[in-house]
Image: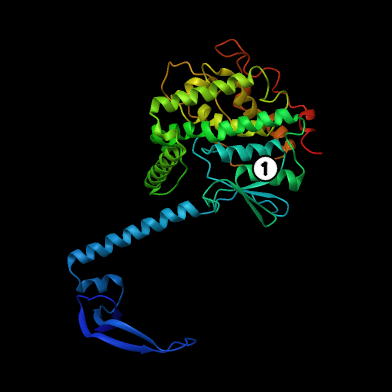
Amino acid sequence: MYWRVGFAWTRSCVLELARNKSFTLDFCGSEGPLSLYGYIIAHPLQEYGGIMSALASDTWWRKTLYITGGALLAAAAYLLHELLVIRKEQELDPQDAIILHQFARPKTGVPSLSPFCLKIETYLRMADLPYQNYFDGRLSPQGKMPWIAYNQEQVYGTEFIINFVEEKLGVNLNSSLSPEEKAISRAITKMVEEHFYWTIAYCQWVDNVEETQKMLSTNGPLSDLLKWIVSQVTGGIVKREMYGHGIGRFSKEEVYTLMEKDMRTLATLLGDKKYLMGPQFSTVDASVFGHLAQAMWTLPGTRPEQLIKGEFINLAMYCERIRRKFWPEWFVDVDDLYYDGLSDEPVSPSLLADLGLYSHSDSFQELESLPSHRDTQTPDSDVTGRSLFDSDMDTEVSETEHLKG
């Protein structure tokens, strides 16, 4: 039989050779001897050794504790791996390419459940810039997502990302706007991101958290547990931050009343225009689309979906206009563009293609020329009799001429 002798900080059940003895150890490179205090213990091992043989001398409850603890550690390691594993798309040359760090694609056809991640990715497509997605789950030092890396530089916060891109790459989606229009554009952006956002987050992660949980993309035997953990943690964060913001101190009905007022404001500002500031898209459209898309495609049967596909149908057409122009691989059912209130069953759009997402207008035109189920079903109008697509679904090159210069 073999015996193993060791040193322990606490009393053990196995054979105790000495108690409260002082050892003087001299490690290489240490400035002086080290003294350790504790118990010297020894325990028998089977000839094949191993952890389980060491447990043989323990009581049954201690064995159960060790086994349970080991299982929990293994589960925690797996969950941590799922949260931190880097999921990269098709490799691009990192030189002069934007690396976009964001949350993983959800299981629905929507590119992101985060309005801000969808905002920045849509902005990069509007600006016709190449980029690489890293779905690594790594938050910025401020604890936010998304963030970008460009030639060893890291930029955090969507507003600072856009400023960085404009300065470094000479892109400006607002070049055609007057100073007054730029001021209005910023005011709209702040209303959407600092007020309307919280009402959408409340609907996603508090009032409708069970449905949002199903959309999370995780794999493996513990995927359901991971989804539950993520949704509960996110919901708790949203409630705490909403309370600090102030909007979380109101009742559910009051929150939805504020949401309706914001959506009504956007619908009024948009009117019959193609984009919020006129015939050409600008930076504010990326932000507004990122938020309205959540109401449009991630919250089936909820109050925001009923509003955007009912009373504020021009916002639904606006979202579809941007989706078709800048997300050609993101397919949705045309019948899902309005809410008729006749069915509570959510539509299941096809999954978003996991493309390299190398944002370039040439690749977009190639994708649009391919046959798809969108071409087989295109009604001329919605339930209100207004055109869903109008004449503004064109892809004139003139619209992108104002981006650079």
Would residue 65 appear left or right of 121 to someone viewing this image?
left
Look at label 1 and name its amino acid: Ile
Foreground residue, 196 or 336?
196
Would residue 130 appear left or right of 233 to someone viewing this image?
right
Of helix, strand and loop, which one carries label 1?
helix
Residue beneath the point at 48% across and 25% down: 258
- Residue 365, by quadrant, is top right
The residue beneath circle 1 is 162
Foreground residue, 355 or 267?
267
Residue beneath the point at 39% across and 32% down: 207
Would residue 320 appear left or right of 401 to someone viewing this image?
left
41, above or below 93, in the image: below
177, above or below 55, in the image: above
Which quarter of the image is occupied by the N terminus? bottom left
How many other residues sit within 10 Å of disc 1, few (<14), some (14-19) or many (≥20)? Answer: many
105, above or below 11, in the image: above
Looking at the rendered structure, the number of numbered marks drawn on it comes to: 1
Seen as rendered, the residue at the extreme right is 405
Q: How is the image coloured?
A: rainbow
Question: Where's residue 212, x and y in %?
Answer: 43, 36
Foreground residue, 121 or 74?
121
Question: Where's residue 74, x and y in %?
Answer: 37, 59
Question: Where's residue 98, x and y in %?
Answer: 67, 49
Residue beneath the point at 50% across and 20% down: 307
Q: Is residue 151 visible?
A: yes
- Residue 41, by quadrant, is bottom left
Q: Is residue 371 visible?
A: no
Residue beneath the point at 61% across and 29% down: 188
Question: Where's residue 215, x and y in %?
Answer: 46, 37
Which quarter of the image is occupied by the C terminus? top right
